[in-house]
Image (spheres, coloured by chain):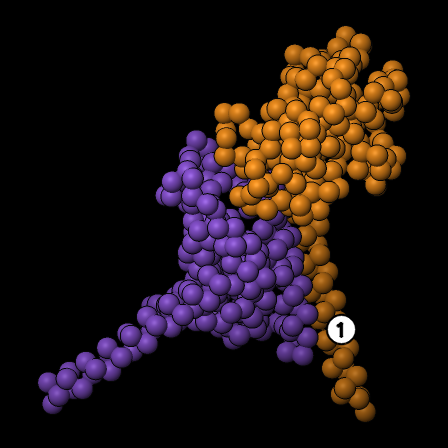
Chain colours: A orange, B purple
Amino acid sequence: MQDTASRLSLRNALAMAAFTIAFTALMAGTYLLTHETIAKSAEAEKLTLIDAILPRSLYDNALLKDEITLPPTPEIGLDDGGHAWRARRGDEPAAVVIEAAAPDGYSGRIDLIVAVAHDGALLGVRVTQHRETPGLGDYIDPKKDKNKSRPWISQFDNRPAGLPADTWRVRRDGGAIDSMSGATISARAVTNAVGRVLAYVAVHRDTLFARGTQ
Amino acid sequence: MSTSLRDITYSGVWKNNTGLVQLLGMCPLLAVSTSAVNGVSLGLATIAVMALSNAVVAALRNLIPYEIRIPVFILIIAALVTVIDLALNAWLHSLYLVLGIFVPLIVTNCIVLARVEAFAAKNGVLASAVDGAAMGAGLVLVLAVLGSVRELIGTGALLNGIELIVPGAHAIRLFPENYPNLLLAVLPPGAFIVLGCLIAAKNWFDARTAARTQASAPTTAGASA
């Protein structure tokens, strides 16, 4: 005689397996249909962000293809490593776009990309991810900045090389970068991180701009 | 049939509103309602997921063994959310940039599972889809009001971030430029305070409506007699 409990378990296990296979197949199918388009738009998105700080006229190589992987670099906030992309013009190094992070935002880590020209000039900075307080500290992201014509982050645009290190502090700390009163912490975190990135790029210029990929 | 669909809609949008009556799925609701644009975006994504998951579960309800229905429901919801997330990302990318971060959040919203278990498992495909959409619409309503109140008190302007959805549109400043932003409203405690006020307002409104119908009921009964 068949044990009904074990038959029931077997039936349920088979049903569960059938549902799992069917819906996993559905997800796998959707993934296969979409992953190419998604990868393309992720790349386009990254390029849009980079375009804002590194004009296309400065380089002629396939920027995202010339990627170097940075080992864990705590001095610029990359505890788990990061990436940098190298811009070249007619085979001559033009600039580097480097990932960095400020660990000391008001609500934790602020991810940045920083574009530095070959001569050490700062081309621009963008915030790629943050959790700063909405309406208070989030003006570090130009999409959230209320000043659309001259967002806060544009203070970092096109700063020449060789500025003294204490330029890269908010005015309240004796530097040259303005911040909004009452919301200094986010601005200070980004500003100090930019200073650290410039110092890092100055030291590691030769490795960052080295010829050849990888 | 049409009256029952109307009842389902009324129940979802008002009588059993997820945000104000059932109080289910509070985590995403309170976290995302810092502005009207964010709140409505999450709500719209929830409508899509709830209507679809309710419809699929209703269609399969006779195939799902009763004993393992909960894991199967979760499997269905998670798979549908993944599919919607991928499809939005690939084919409606500009919409994905706005809704993208909210879609995976919906899996954590227990209202989806609650409606699947309480409604879709026992009803037809059309009624279940309407129930899901109506519950989602009720959520949109609450999130729109909650988000508007919070951003107005917190920043003095309405529709912050609208330019991400409608390029060229601007936030509407209602309070003067020197308005001291009351940040409490935008921070998490503000979500609970404003939601509490909304629940109180709905209960007051319902109590008043009930009192009026009661007051007018005897007169109509008397007139017909």
Q: Chain of mark 1?
A: A
Q: Quadrant of the C terminus of chain A?
A: top right
For this view, does B76 lie left or right of residue A161?
Answer: left
From this viewpoint, is residue B55 visible? no
Q: Secondary structure at mark 1?
A: helix
Query: Residue, x 62% and y 72% (percent of image)?
Result: B63
Total numbered labels:
1
Query: Residue, x 49% and y 72% (percent of image)?
Result: B22
Front position in the image: B126 or B99: B99
- Kind of residue at badge 1: Ala
Front position in the image: B52 or B144: B144
Expressed as whole percent of the image width and height from the top left, the position of residue B124 reads 48, 70
**Which residue was labeled with disc 1?**
A13
Q: Is residue B75 above or below residue B100?
A: below
Q: Residue furthest bottom?
A: A1
Name the quadrant containing residue B98.
top right
